[in-house]
Amino acid sequence: MANLAAVVGIGQTKYMTRRLDVSIAGLVREAAVNALQDADLTWDDIDAVILGKAPDMFEGVIMPEAYLTDALGCNGKPMLRVHTAGSVGGSTALVAASHVQSGMFKRVLTVSFEKQSESNAMWALSNPQPFSTHLNAGAGGYFAPIIREYMRRSNAPYDVGIKVAVKDRLHGARNPLAHLQKPDITMQEVEESFMLWDPIRFLEACPSSDGACAMIIANEELADKASKKPAWIRGVAMRSEPTMYAGRDEVNPQAGRDCAADVYKQAGITNPRKDLDCAEVYVPFSWYEPMWLENLGFAPEGEGWKLTMEGATSLDEGGDIPWNCSGGVLSSNAIGASGMIRFAEAARQVRGDAGAHQVEGAKLALGHAYGGGAQFYAMWVVGSEKP
Amino acid sequence: MSEEQEVVTVVKAPVYLKYNFTAGAAPARFLAQIKKGVLTGQRCPKCSAVYVPPRGSCGGCGVATEEEVVLSNKATVQSFTIVYIPIPNNPIQPPYIIANVVPDGANVSFIHLMSECVNEDVHIGARVEAVWKPKEEWGFAMDNIRYYRPIDEPNVPVDQIGKLSVNGQEG
Protein backbone atom coordinates (compact mmCIF):
# COMPACT_ATOMS: atom_id res chain seq x y z
CA MET A 1 0.00 0.00 0.00
CA ALA A 2 1.37 3.39 -1.04
CA ASN A 3 1.96 6.19 1.46
CA LEU A 4 -0.13 9.33 1.14
CA ALA A 5 1.23 12.17 -0.92
CA ALA A 6 -0.04 15.60 -1.91
CA VAL A 7 0.73 18.53 -4.16
CA VAL A 8 1.91 21.38 -1.92
CA GLY A 9 3.19 23.83 -4.53
CA ILE A 10 2.42 24.69 -8.14
CA GLY A 11 4.31 27.01 -10.45
CA GLN A 12 3.78 27.82 -14.11
CA THR A 13 5.10 30.28 -16.62
CA LYS A 14 2.91 32.41 -18.85
CA TYR A 15 2.46 30.35 -22.04
CA MET A 16 3.31 32.20 -25.24
CA THR A 17 4.69 31.76 -28.73
CA ARG A 18 8.21 32.94 -27.90
CA ARG A 19 10.00 33.52 -24.65
CA LEU A 20 13.02 35.28 -26.06
CA ASP A 21 14.00 36.69 -22.67
CA VAL A 22 14.93 33.31 -21.18
CA SER A 23 16.88 30.21 -22.18
CA ILE A 24 15.47 26.74 -21.56
CA ALA A 25 17.25 26.81 -18.19
CA GLY A 26 15.67 30.18 -17.36
CA LEU A 27 12.26 28.90 -18.37
CA VAL A 28 12.30 25.81 -16.14
CA ARG A 29 13.81 27.75 -13.26
CA GLU A 30 11.00 30.30 -13.45
CA ALA A 31 8.35 27.58 -13.07
CA ALA A 32 10.33 25.91 -10.26
CA VAL A 33 10.81 29.17 -8.35
CA ASN A 34 7.09 29.91 -8.71
CA ALA A 35 6.30 26.47 -7.25
CA LEU A 36 8.72 26.98 -4.35
CA GLN A 37 7.16 30.37 -3.60
CA ASP A 38 3.67 28.89 -3.79
CA ALA A 39 4.74 26.25 -1.26
CA ASP A 40 6.71 28.73 0.85
CA LEU A 41 9.79 26.54 0.54
CA THR A 42 13.42 26.92 -0.58
CA TRP A 43 15.72 24.79 -2.74
CA ASP A 44 17.11 23.11 0.39
CA ASP A 45 13.67 21.66 1.13
CA ILE A 46 13.74 19.56 -2.06
CA ASP A 47 15.09 16.00 -1.91
CA ALA A 48 15.05 15.10 -5.62
CA VAL A 49 13.99 16.42 -9.01
CA ILE A 50 11.93 14.57 -11.64
CA LEU A 51 12.04 16.18 -15.08
CA GLY A 52 10.03 15.54 -18.23
CA LYS A 53 9.90 16.88 -21.75
CA ALA A 54 8.95 15.68 -25.21
CA PRO A 55 11.59 14.05 -27.46
CA ASP A 56 15.03 15.73 -27.45
CA MET A 57 14.81 16.25 -31.21
CA PHE A 58 12.28 19.04 -30.66
CA GLU A 59 14.88 21.53 -29.44
CA GLY A 60 17.90 19.52 -30.51
CA VAL A 61 19.29 19.54 -26.97
CA ILE A 62 20.20 15.99 -26.14
CA MET A 63 19.68 14.89 -22.51
CA PRO A 64 18.71 18.39 -21.35
CA GLU A 65 18.25 17.03 -17.84
CA ALA A 66 22.03 17.00 -17.45
CA TYR A 67 22.35 20.65 -18.45
CA LEU A 68 19.37 21.73 -16.34
CA THR A 69 20.63 20.44 -12.98
CA ASP A 70 22.11 23.84 -12.07
CA ALA A 71 18.95 25.71 -12.99
CA LEU A 72 16.84 23.30 -10.94
CA GLY A 73 19.04 23.39 -7.87
CA CYS A 74 19.81 19.71 -7.90
CA ASN A 75 23.57 19.46 -8.02
CA GLY A 76 24.34 16.56 -5.71
CA LYS A 77 20.69 15.55 -5.55
CA PRO A 78 19.02 12.69 -7.37
CA MET A 79 17.45 13.59 -10.71
CA LEU A 80 15.43 11.46 -13.09
CA ARG A 81 14.21 12.16 -16.62
CA VAL A 82 10.95 10.70 -17.94
CA HIS A 83 10.14 10.01 -21.63
CA THR A 84 6.62 9.21 -22.81
CA ALA A 85 6.12 11.54 -25.81
CA GLY A 86 3.13 13.89 -25.48
CA SER A 87 1.89 12.30 -22.26
CA VAL A 88 5.25 12.98 -20.60
CA GLY A 89 4.08 15.83 -18.36
CA GLY A 90 1.51 13.51 -16.80
CA SER A 91 3.86 10.54 -16.53
CA THR A 92 6.51 12.78 -14.97
CA ALA A 93 4.09 13.89 -12.27
CA LEU A 94 3.23 10.25 -11.60
CA VAL A 95 6.88 9.22 -11.37
CA ALA A 96 7.44 12.10 -8.95
CA ALA A 97 4.41 11.05 -6.91
CA SER A 98 5.63 7.44 -6.77
CA HIS A 99 8.99 8.59 -5.35
CA VAL A 100 7.08 10.08 -2.41
CA GLN A 101 4.38 7.40 -2.11
CA SER A 102 7.08 4.74 -1.92
CA GLY A 103 8.75 6.51 1.00
CA MET A 104 11.95 7.02 -0.99
CA PHE A 105 11.82 10.82 -0.64
CA LYS A 106 9.86 13.20 1.55
CA ARG A 107 9.48 16.04 -0.90
CA VAL A 108 10.27 16.20 -4.60
CA LEU A 109 10.19 18.88 -7.25
CA THR A 110 8.83 17.87 -10.64
CA VAL A 111 9.14 20.04 -13.73
CA SER A 112 8.27 19.67 -17.37
CA PHE A 113 8.71 22.05 -20.26
CA GLU A 114 8.89 22.73 -23.95
CA LYS A 115 10.40 25.70 -25.71
CA GLN A 116 8.76 25.26 -29.06
CA SER A 117 10.18 28.53 -30.38
CA GLU A 118 13.62 26.91 -30.25
CA SER A 119 12.36 23.89 -32.11
CA ASN A 120 10.32 22.71 -35.03
CA ALA A 121 7.95 20.08 -33.72
CA MET A 122 6.27 19.59 -37.09
CA TRP A 123 9.69 18.75 -38.53
CA ALA A 124 10.67 16.57 -35.58
CA LEU A 125 7.43 14.60 -35.95
CA SER A 126 7.67 14.35 -39.73
CA ASN A 127 11.13 12.92 -40.10
CA PRO A 128 11.55 10.40 -42.89
CA GLN A 129 11.85 6.88 -41.54
CA PRO A 130 14.28 4.60 -43.36
CA PHE A 131 12.64 2.55 -46.14
CA SER A 132 9.17 4.01 -45.43
CA THR A 133 7.08 6.47 -47.36
CA HIS A 134 7.81 10.02 -46.24
CA LEU A 135 4.24 11.03 -45.56
CA ASN A 136 4.17 11.88 -41.87
CA ALA A 137 2.42 15.25 -41.84
CA GLY A 138 2.86 16.07 -38.16
CA ALA A 139 0.60 15.04 -35.29
CA GLY A 140 -2.53 16.36 -37.01
CA GLY A 141 -1.86 14.19 -40.05
CA TYR A 142 -1.71 11.18 -37.76
CA PHE A 143 -4.83 11.94 -35.73
CA ALA A 144 -7.11 13.31 -38.48
CA PRO A 145 -8.05 9.87 -39.92
CA ILE A 146 -8.83 8.62 -36.40
CA ILE A 147 -11.12 11.62 -35.85
CA ARG A 148 -12.77 10.94 -39.21
CA GLU A 149 -13.49 7.37 -38.09
CA TYR A 150 -14.98 8.69 -34.81
CA MET A 151 -17.26 11.02 -36.78
CA ARG A 152 -18.41 8.11 -38.94
CA ARG A 153 -19.10 5.78 -36.01
CA SER A 154 -20.80 8.26 -33.74
CA ASN A 155 -22.71 10.06 -36.48
CA ALA A 156 -21.96 13.26 -34.56
CA PRO A 157 -22.91 16.61 -36.09
CA TYR A 158 -20.06 18.24 -38.03
CA ASP A 159 -19.74 21.16 -35.61
CA VAL A 160 -18.93 19.29 -32.37
CA GLY A 161 -15.24 20.02 -32.83
CA ILE A 162 -16.02 23.65 -33.57
CA LYS A 163 -17.96 23.91 -30.33
CA VAL A 164 -15.06 22.44 -28.32
CA ALA A 165 -12.64 24.86 -29.98
CA VAL A 166 -14.80 27.80 -28.90
CA LYS A 167 -15.51 26.46 -25.41
CA ASP A 168 -11.86 25.82 -24.53
CA ARG A 169 -10.77 29.25 -25.82
CA LEU A 170 -13.50 30.91 -23.73
CA HIS A 171 -12.15 28.97 -20.75
CA GLY A 172 -8.63 30.07 -21.68
CA ALA A 173 -9.73 33.70 -21.66
CA ARG A 174 -10.39 33.28 -17.92
CA ASN A 175 -6.83 32.05 -17.35
CA PRO A 176 -4.16 34.76 -17.57
CA LEU A 177 -1.45 32.12 -18.10
CA ALA A 178 -3.16 30.69 -21.21
CA HIS A 179 -1.33 31.32 -24.47
CA LEU A 180 -4.35 32.05 -26.69
CA GLN A 181 -6.53 34.85 -25.37
CA LYS A 182 -9.65 34.83 -27.51
CA PRO A 183 -12.58 36.07 -25.39
CA ASP A 184 -14.58 36.98 -28.50
CA ILE A 185 -14.13 33.75 -30.47
CA THR A 186 -17.21 32.49 -32.33
CA MET A 187 -18.34 29.24 -33.95
CA GLN A 188 -18.25 31.03 -37.29
CA GLU A 189 -14.64 32.14 -36.82
CA VAL A 190 -13.58 28.56 -36.10
CA GLU A 191 -15.59 27.15 -38.98
CA GLU A 192 -14.07 29.66 -41.39
CA SER A 193 -10.50 29.08 -40.22
CA PHE A 194 -8.54 27.17 -42.85
CA MET A 195 -8.47 23.43 -43.06
CA LEU A 196 -5.12 21.91 -42.06
CA TRP A 197 -5.72 18.18 -41.99
CA ASP A 198 -9.34 17.58 -43.02
CA PRO A 199 -11.43 17.36 -40.77
CA ILE A 200 -9.13 19.43 -38.48
CA ARG A 201 -9.29 23.20 -38.99
CA PHE A 202 -6.62 25.64 -37.86
CA LEU A 203 -8.64 26.83 -34.84
CA GLU A 204 -9.48 23.22 -33.93
CA ALA A 205 -5.78 22.54 -33.34
CA CYS A 206 -3.54 23.47 -30.43
CA PRO A 207 -0.99 26.31 -30.65
CA SER A 208 2.80 25.96 -30.29
CA SER A 209 3.91 27.42 -26.99
CA ASP A 210 6.94 28.07 -24.84
CA GLY A 211 6.37 27.22 -21.23
CA ALA A 212 7.11 25.16 -18.14
CA CYS A 213 5.08 23.75 -15.30
CA ALA A 214 6.34 22.63 -11.89
CA MET A 215 4.87 20.97 -8.83
CA ILE A 216 6.15 20.06 -5.40
CA ILE A 217 4.87 16.78 -4.05
CA ALA A 218 5.25 16.01 -0.36
CA ASN A 219 4.53 13.11 1.97
CA GLU A 220 1.65 13.14 4.46
CA GLU A 221 3.62 14.56 7.37
CA LEU A 222 4.94 17.51 5.35
CA ALA A 223 1.66 18.04 3.47
CA ASP A 224 -0.17 18.34 6.79
CA LYS A 225 2.18 21.21 7.67
CA ALA A 226 1.97 22.87 4.24
CA SER A 227 1.47 26.63 4.16
CA LYS A 228 -1.38 26.37 1.64
CA LYS A 229 -4.09 23.77 1.20
CA PRO A 230 -2.63 20.62 -0.36
CA ALA A 231 -4.19 18.62 -3.20
CA TRP A 232 -4.23 15.02 -1.98
CA ILE A 233 -3.34 12.39 -4.56
CA ARG A 234 -6.22 9.90 -4.55
CA GLY A 235 -5.28 7.68 -7.46
CA VAL A 236 -2.47 7.28 -9.99
CA ALA A 237 -2.37 5.13 -13.13
CA MET A 238 -0.34 4.67 -16.29
CA ARG A 239 -1.02 2.34 -19.22
CA SER A 240 0.40 1.87 -22.69
CA GLU A 241 -0.36 -0.23 -25.75
CA PRO A 242 1.44 -0.90 -29.04
CA THR A 243 0.94 1.69 -31.80
CA MET A 244 0.04 -1.04 -34.24
CA TYR A 245 -1.69 -4.34 -33.72
CA ALA A 246 -4.42 -6.09 -35.65
CA GLY A 247 -7.85 -5.12 -34.40
CA ARG A 248 -6.59 -2.14 -32.38
CA ASP A 249 -9.36 0.34 -31.63
CA GLU A 250 -7.60 3.62 -32.34
CA VAL A 251 -10.70 5.69 -31.65
CA ASN A 252 -11.32 4.25 -28.19
CA PRO A 253 -8.02 2.67 -27.15
CA GLN A 254 -8.06 -0.08 -24.57
CA ALA A 255 -5.07 1.37 -22.68
CA GLY A 256 -7.06 4.56 -22.01
CA ARG A 257 -10.08 2.64 -20.80
CA ASP A 258 -7.95 0.41 -18.56
CA CYS A 259 -6.03 3.37 -17.15
CA ALA A 260 -9.25 5.21 -16.29
CA ALA A 261 -10.77 2.13 -14.66
CA ASP A 262 -7.65 1.74 -12.49
CA VAL A 263 -7.47 5.36 -11.35
CA TYR A 264 -11.22 5.52 -10.64
CA LYS A 265 -11.05 2.35 -8.55
CA GLN A 266 -8.29 3.80 -6.38
CA ALA A 267 -10.23 7.04 -5.89
CA GLY A 268 -13.55 5.28 -5.21
CA ILE A 269 -15.16 6.72 -8.34
CA THR A 270 -17.98 4.68 -9.85
CA ASN A 271 -19.62 7.36 -12.01
CA PRO A 272 -16.98 9.80 -13.24
CA ARG A 273 -19.44 12.40 -14.54
CA LYS A 274 -21.21 12.49 -11.18
CA ASP A 275 -18.36 11.81 -8.77
CA LEU A 276 -15.79 14.20 -10.25
CA ASP A 277 -16.27 17.97 -10.11
CA CYS A 278 -14.13 18.77 -13.13
CA ALA A 279 -11.45 17.32 -15.37
CA GLU A 280 -8.35 18.53 -17.17
CA VAL A 281 -8.02 16.24 -20.16
CA TYR A 282 -5.43 16.27 -22.95
CA VAL A 283 -7.38 17.57 -25.97
CA PRO A 284 -4.89 18.85 -28.59
CA PHE A 285 -7.44 18.60 -31.42
CA SER A 286 -11.02 19.60 -30.64
CA TRP A 287 -12.67 16.30 -31.54
CA TYR A 288 -10.65 14.55 -28.85
CA GLU A 289 -13.05 15.96 -26.24
CA PRO A 290 -16.02 13.79 -27.30
CA MET A 291 -13.67 10.88 -27.99
CA TRP A 292 -12.14 11.02 -24.51
CA LEU A 293 -15.53 11.64 -22.87
CA GLU A 294 -16.34 8.13 -24.06
CA ASN A 295 -12.91 6.59 -23.47
CA LEU A 296 -12.89 7.93 -19.89
CA GLY A 297 -16.42 6.74 -19.13
CA PHE A 298 -18.14 10.14 -18.85
CA ALA A 299 -20.55 9.08 -21.61
CA PRO A 300 -21.55 5.79 -23.27
CA GLU A 301 -19.74 4.91 -26.49
CA GLY A 302 -20.99 7.02 -29.40
CA GLU A 303 -22.54 9.67 -27.15
CA GLY A 304 -19.65 11.79 -25.90
CA TRP A 305 -20.50 14.53 -28.39
CA LYS A 306 -23.91 14.95 -26.78
CA LEU A 307 -22.32 16.17 -23.53
CA THR A 308 -20.25 18.66 -25.48
CA MET A 309 -23.24 19.96 -27.43
CA GLU A 310 -25.42 20.19 -24.30
CA GLY A 311 -22.80 22.37 -22.66
CA ALA A 312 -22.10 19.82 -19.92
CA THR A 313 -18.34 20.43 -20.24
CA SER A 314 -18.58 24.24 -20.37
CA LEU A 315 -18.03 26.60 -17.43
CA ASP A 316 -19.74 29.42 -19.29
CA GLU A 317 -22.84 27.31 -19.87
CA GLY A 318 -22.92 26.11 -16.27
CA GLY A 319 -22.16 22.52 -17.23
CA ASP A 320 -22.21 19.82 -14.57
CA ILE A 321 -18.78 18.43 -15.52
CA PRO A 322 -16.55 21.24 -16.81
CA TRP A 323 -13.60 20.02 -18.87
CA ASN A 324 -10.41 22.04 -19.32
CA CYS A 325 -11.39 25.10 -17.32
CA SER A 326 -7.82 26.40 -17.78
CA GLY A 327 -8.35 26.48 -21.55
CA GLY A 328 -6.68 23.12 -22.03
CA VAL A 329 -4.11 22.10 -24.63
CA LEU A 330 -6.19 23.96 -27.24
CA SER A 331 -5.23 27.22 -25.48
CA SER A 332 -1.63 26.46 -24.42
CA ASN A 333 0.63 23.75 -25.78
CA ALA A 334 4.16 23.64 -24.50
CA ILE A 335 4.18 19.96 -25.50
CA GLY A 336 6.35 18.42 -22.77
CA ALA A 337 4.58 20.52 -20.14
CA SER A 338 1.04 20.03 -21.48
CA GLY A 339 0.38 16.83 -19.53
CA MET A 340 1.72 18.29 -16.29
CA ILE A 341 -0.37 21.42 -16.78
CA ARG A 342 -3.44 19.16 -16.82
CA PHE A 343 -2.32 17.51 -13.57
CA ALA A 344 -1.42 20.85 -11.96
CA GLU A 345 -4.66 22.51 -13.05
CA ALA A 346 -6.66 19.62 -11.57
CA ALA A 347 -4.74 20.21 -8.32
CA ARG A 348 -5.39 23.97 -8.47
CA GLN A 349 -9.12 23.26 -8.69
CA VAL A 350 -9.26 21.11 -5.55
CA ARG A 351 -7.03 23.57 -3.71
CA GLY A 352 -9.62 26.24 -4.57
CA ASP A 353 -6.81 28.23 -6.15
CA ALA A 354 -7.83 28.39 -9.82
CA GLY A 355 -8.80 32.06 -9.97
CA ALA A 356 -11.35 33.04 -12.60
CA HIS A 357 -11.55 29.50 -13.96
CA GLN A 358 -12.30 27.95 -10.56
CA VAL A 359 -15.13 25.41 -10.40
CA GLU A 360 -16.90 26.41 -7.25
CA GLY A 361 -16.41 23.96 -4.42
CA ALA A 362 -14.40 21.48 -6.51
CA LYS A 363 -13.44 18.53 -4.31
CA LEU A 364 -12.35 15.85 -6.76
CA ALA A 365 -10.66 16.40 -10.13
CA LEU A 366 -9.11 14.28 -12.86
CA GLY A 367 -5.82 15.09 -14.60
CA HIS A 368 -5.20 13.22 -17.87
CA ALA A 369 -2.52 13.02 -20.52
CA TYR A 370 -1.97 10.93 -23.62
CA GLY A 371 0.87 10.65 -26.05
CA GLY A 372 2.56 8.92 -28.95
CA GLY A 373 0.08 7.35 -31.37
CA ALA A 374 -2.56 7.66 -28.60
CA GLN A 375 -0.78 4.78 -26.93
CA PHE A 376 0.60 6.23 -23.66
CA TYR A 377 -1.80 7.22 -20.89
CA ALA A 378 -1.21 8.89 -17.54
CA MET A 379 -3.94 9.90 -15.10
CA TRP A 380 -4.37 11.04 -11.56
CA VAL A 381 -7.28 11.96 -9.36
CA VAL A 382 -6.66 14.66 -6.75
CA GLY A 383 -8.96 15.64 -3.90
CA SER A 384 -9.40 18.47 -1.44
CA GLU A 385 -9.78 16.02 1.44
CA LYS A 386 -7.19 13.64 2.82
CA PRO A 387 -8.38 10.10 2.02
CA MET B 1 27.41 54.09 -28.58
CA SER B 2 26.43 55.97 -31.69
CA GLU B 3 24.42 53.22 -33.30
CA GLU B 4 21.91 51.10 -31.52
CA GLN B 5 22.63 47.42 -32.05
CA GLU B 6 19.93 44.83 -32.13
CA VAL B 7 20.19 42.28 -29.36
CA VAL B 8 20.81 38.78 -30.70
CA THR B 9 18.31 36.44 -29.09
CA VAL B 10 18.16 33.62 -31.63
CA VAL B 11 20.74 31.95 -33.83
CA LYS B 12 19.92 29.18 -36.28
CA ALA B 13 22.44 26.36 -36.18
CA PRO B 14 21.52 23.47 -38.48
CA VAL B 15 23.04 20.14 -37.51
CA TYR B 16 23.32 17.03 -39.66
CA LEU B 17 23.41 13.49 -38.46
CA LYS B 18 24.36 10.72 -40.88
CA TYR B 19 23.76 7.18 -39.82
CA ASN B 20 23.55 3.66 -41.13
CA PHE B 21 20.26 1.94 -40.52
CA THR B 22 19.92 -1.81 -40.13
CA ALA B 23 16.41 -2.86 -41.02
CA GLY B 24 16.28 -6.01 -38.87
CA ALA B 25 15.29 -9.52 -39.96
CA ALA B 26 11.58 -9.10 -40.74
CA PRO B 27 11.77 -5.72 -42.50
CA ALA B 28 14.84 -6.93 -44.44
CA ARG B 29 12.79 -9.83 -45.88
CA PHE B 30 9.95 -7.43 -46.63
CA LEU B 31 12.26 -4.97 -48.37
CA ALA B 32 13.93 -7.72 -50.42
CA GLN B 33 10.49 -8.63 -51.75
CA ILE B 34 9.36 -5.08 -52.40
CA LYS B 35 12.58 -4.56 -54.38
CA LYS B 36 11.15 -7.26 -56.69
CA GLY B 37 7.75 -5.56 -56.86
CA VAL B 38 6.02 -7.90 -54.41
CA LEU B 39 4.16 -6.67 -51.32
CA THR B 40 4.43 -9.15 -48.46
CA GLY B 41 3.25 -9.43 -44.86
CA GLN B 42 3.90 -11.84 -42.02
CA ARG B 43 1.29 -13.93 -40.25
CA CYS B 44 1.02 -14.27 -36.47
CA PRO B 45 1.17 -17.98 -35.53
CA LYS B 46 -1.27 -17.38 -32.68
CA CYS B 47 -4.05 -15.05 -33.89
CA SER B 48 -3.41 -15.43 -37.67
CA ALA B 49 -3.34 -11.64 -38.17
CA VAL B 50 -1.17 -10.57 -41.10
CA TYR B 51 1.10 -7.56 -40.52
CA VAL B 52 2.40 -5.22 -43.20
CA PRO B 53 5.04 -3.93 -43.18
CA PRO B 54 6.05 -6.75 -40.84
CA ARG B 55 8.08 -5.87 -37.79
CA GLY B 56 8.76 -9.47 -36.87
CA SER B 57 6.18 -9.76 -34.12
CA CYS B 58 2.48 -9.46 -33.43
CA GLY B 59 1.79 -6.43 -31.26
CA GLY B 60 -1.40 -8.02 -29.97
CA CYS B 61 -0.05 -11.45 -28.98
CA GLY B 62 3.56 -10.53 -28.33
CA VAL B 63 4.90 -13.47 -30.35
CA ALA B 64 7.35 -13.61 -33.26
CA THR B 65 5.99 -13.78 -36.80
CA GLU B 66 7.71 -15.97 -39.38
CA GLU B 67 5.35 -17.09 -42.16
CA GLU B 68 5.53 -14.81 -45.17
CA VAL B 69 2.33 -13.99 -47.06
CA VAL B 70 2.09 -12.38 -50.49
CA LEU B 71 -0.48 -9.58 -50.45
CA SER B 72 -2.67 -8.12 -53.15
CA ASN B 73 -2.11 -4.87 -55.02
CA LYS B 74 -5.71 -4.13 -54.17
CA ALA B 75 -6.56 -2.51 -50.86
CA THR B 76 -9.32 -0.79 -48.89
CA VAL B 77 -9.32 2.73 -47.43
CA GLN B 78 -9.69 2.38 -43.65
CA SER B 79 -9.59 6.14 -43.10
CA PHE B 80 -7.82 9.18 -44.56
CA THR B 81 -7.10 12.87 -44.27
CA ILE B 82 -6.87 15.61 -46.89
CA VAL B 83 -3.74 17.55 -46.00
CA TYR B 84 -3.51 21.25 -46.85
CA ILE B 85 0.04 21.90 -45.66
CA PRO B 86 3.34 20.68 -47.10
CA ILE B 87 5.41 17.94 -45.48
CA PRO B 88 8.86 19.29 -44.53
CA ASN B 89 11.40 18.21 -47.17
CA ASN B 90 8.79 16.51 -49.33
CA PRO B 91 8.04 18.13 -52.72
CA ILE B 92 4.41 16.98 -52.76
CA GLN B 93 1.97 19.87 -53.31
CA PRO B 94 -1.09 20.27 -51.05
CA PRO B 95 -3.90 19.45 -50.94
CA TYR B 96 -3.15 15.75 -51.07
CA ILE B 97 -4.70 12.67 -49.48
CA ILE B 98 -2.93 10.48 -47.00
CA ALA B 99 -4.92 7.30 -46.55
CA ASN B 100 -4.68 4.42 -44.12
CA VAL B 101 -4.92 1.51 -46.56
CA VAL B 102 -5.25 -2.20 -45.78
CA PRO B 103 -4.02 -4.44 -48.60
CA ASP B 104 -6.20 -7.48 -49.28
CA GLY B 105 -4.78 -10.35 -47.27
CA ALA B 106 -3.49 -8.11 -44.45
CA ASN B 107 -5.14 -7.10 -41.16
CA VAL B 108 -3.40 -3.80 -40.44
CA SER B 109 -3.22 -0.58 -42.42
CA PHE B 110 -0.27 1.58 -43.40
CA ILE B 111 -0.33 5.15 -44.60
CA HIS B 112 0.16 5.94 -48.26
CA LEU B 113 -0.58 8.65 -50.76
CA MET B 114 -3.73 8.59 -52.89
CA SER B 115 -3.81 10.03 -56.36
CA GLU B 116 -5.77 9.93 -59.66
CA CYS B 117 -8.84 10.69 -57.56
CA VAL B 118 -11.21 13.52 -56.77
CA ASN B 119 -10.26 14.31 -53.17
CA GLU B 120 -13.86 14.95 -52.13
CA ASP B 121 -14.95 11.53 -53.45
CA VAL B 122 -12.56 9.50 -51.32
CA HIS B 123 -14.35 7.72 -48.49
CA ILE B 124 -13.95 5.06 -45.82
CA GLY B 125 -14.39 1.60 -47.36
CA ALA B 126 -13.34 2.72 -50.87
CA ARG B 127 -11.46 0.21 -53.02
CA VAL B 128 -8.03 1.20 -54.31
CA GLU B 129 -5.01 -0.35 -55.99
CA ALA B 130 -1.29 0.23 -55.84
CA VAL B 131 0.38 2.08 -58.70
CA TRP B 132 4.04 1.09 -58.85
CA LYS B 133 6.94 3.16 -60.09
CA PRO B 134 8.69 1.92 -63.24
CA LYS B 135 10.66 -1.24 -62.48
CA GLU B 136 14.04 0.41 -63.03
CA GLU B 137 13.33 2.79 -60.14
CA TRP B 138 12.59 0.05 -57.61
CA GLY B 139 14.73 0.11 -54.50
CA PHE B 140 14.53 -1.26 -50.98
CA ALA B 141 11.70 1.13 -50.18
CA MET B 142 7.98 1.32 -49.56
CA ASP B 143 7.70 4.14 -52.06
CA ASN B 144 8.29 1.72 -54.94
CA ILE B 145 4.52 2.04 -54.75
CA ARG B 146 4.07 5.59 -56.03
CA TYR B 147 0.51 5.91 -54.72
CA TYR B 148 -2.88 4.22 -54.53
CA ARG B 149 -5.74 5.06 -56.90
CA PRO B 150 -9.47 4.27 -56.78
CA ILE B 151 -10.82 1.23 -58.62
CA ASP B 152 -14.34 0.48 -59.74
CA GLU B 153 -15.41 -2.03 -57.09
CA PRO B 154 -18.20 -1.90 -54.50
CA ASN B 155 -17.36 -0.37 -51.12
CA VAL B 156 -16.24 -2.70 -48.37
CA PRO B 157 -18.70 -2.71 -45.43
CA VAL B 158 -17.04 -1.08 -42.42
CA ASP B 159 -17.05 -4.26 -40.34
CA GLN B 160 -15.16 -6.06 -43.12
CA ILE B 161 -12.36 -3.50 -43.52
CA GLY B 162 -9.07 -5.16 -42.61
CA LYS B 163 -10.58 -8.63 -42.90
CA LEU B 164 -10.55 -9.34 -46.64
CA SER B 165 -8.54 -12.29 -47.91
CA VAL B 166 -5.85 -11.91 -50.53
CA ASN B 167 -8.58 -12.59 -53.11
CA GLY B 168 -10.35 -9.41 -52.04
CA GLN B 169 -14.09 -9.23 -52.34
CA GLU B 170 -14.12 -12.56 -54.21
CA GLY B 171 -13.57 -14.09 -50.73
Image: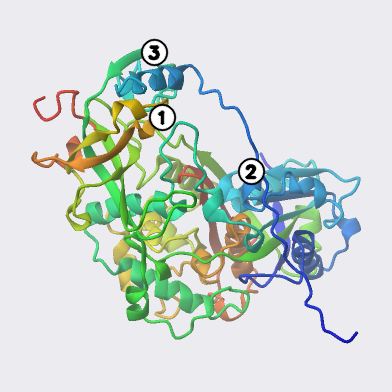
- Crowdedness near tag 1: few (<14), some (14–19) or many (≥20) residues, C-alpha within 10 Å: some
Distance CA(mark 3)–CA(mark 1): 21 Å
Q: Is residue A296 left or right of residue A87?
A: left
Numbered mark located on residue B66 in the image = 3
| Badge 3 element | loop
Distance CA(mark 3)–CA(mark 2): 32 Å
Q: Is residue A27 left or right of residue A367?
A: right
Q: Looking at the picture, how far across and down is residue B149, in whole percent?
A: 21, 42
Query: Could you tell me if residue A262 is visible in this image?
Result: no
Q: Chain of mark 2?
A: A
Location of mark 2 (residue):
A83
Both labels 3 and 2 in a single chain: no
Q: Looking at the picture, how far across and down is residue A65, in whole percent?
A: 76, 47
Marks 2 and 1: in contact by CB < 8 Å?
A: no
Judge by depth and name the residue closer to the eye, A337 or A201: A201
Q: Is residue A11 above or below residue B145?
A: below
| Callout 3 amino acid | Glu
